[in-house]
Image (cartoon, helix red, strand yellow):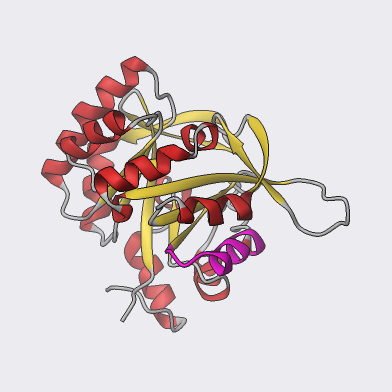
Amino acid sequence: MSFKRIIPCLDVDDGKVVKGVKFEGIKEVGDLVELAKKYCADGADELAFLDIGASVKSRVTLIEVIKKVAAEVTVPFCVGGGIRSVEDARAVIEAGANKVSVCSSALLRPELLRELADAFGSQSVMLAIDAKRVADADGSPRWNAFSHGGRTDTGRNAVEWAIQAVELGVGEIMVNSIDADGTEAGYDLELTRQIAESVKVPVIASGGAGNLEQIAEVLQKTGADAALVASLLHFDKTTVQEIKKFSDNRGICVKR
């Protein structure tokens, strides 16, 4: 039986958890290790950490924090942000991470995905796609993949990029809607559905969770294997257990 996963997402800058809206207005939320322990104890299936600073200073800090997290939590966790090479990935995996997530570096050099999959196995490589809806000539839905924290439009079709990434060896895809990020207005269901239907690897829906109904909706209607949740948890509007209980009552197969 395949369980749908609930994954708390923690954006990290210089070792501290932060959160913004549509990648802007970043403010500090709390301590990474303490929040990781809290969500793990509450039943999170996995954890996702994204180093949004990804500077040399924040990278050194993050490696040390990853070691502390690995010593405290019992669920798998993924680390992304600033991973540009096999050596970068090896550093976070040796520190205790189970997976690495790449975004901008893979858009700049897609072959990196194959190198990571060859080095660590597809199960340890996640592609994060920061996607934003753009105008298409015929009016049909289209999303482009953005790089550099959502600031640069690569012009690359997000769905086609997901397909290519899987061909290169990626074992999982996280679909993050820039339009919905931090708004609590709901996930981009159509974007998530199109990518989930186009690839044969697990897809994680990200960006926009504002209530329990929206989380259940994205898991039921899009083919997503997991839902990433941030603001709702960070600001104590719900808990992982409440999300799972609500989802279970809606007939969604979650691990309780």
Quadrant of res 1: bottom left
Query: Which residue is found at the position 62% from the left and 64% from the top?
Result: 194
> In the figure, 107 relative to 223: above or below?
above
**Is residue 215 at least partly visible in the picture?**
yes
Seen as rendered, the residue at the extreme top is: 57
Instruction: Estimate the x, y position of residue 55 in percent, counting from the top left.
Output: 39, 18
**Is residue 207 at least partly visible in the picture?**
no
Q: Left or right of 145: which side holds 44?
A: left
Q: Which residues are magenta?
A: 190-202
Q: Nearer the viewer, residue 79 or 44?
A: 79
Query: Which residue is found at the position 30% from the left and 27% from the top?
Result: 15
Query: Which residue is found at the position 88% from the left and 56% from the top?
Result: 138
> In the figure, 190 relative to 175: above or below?
below
Q: Is residue 195 magenta?
A: yes
Seen as rendered, the residue at the extreme left is: 71
Query: Which residue is found at the position 59% from the left and 58% from the top?
Result: 187
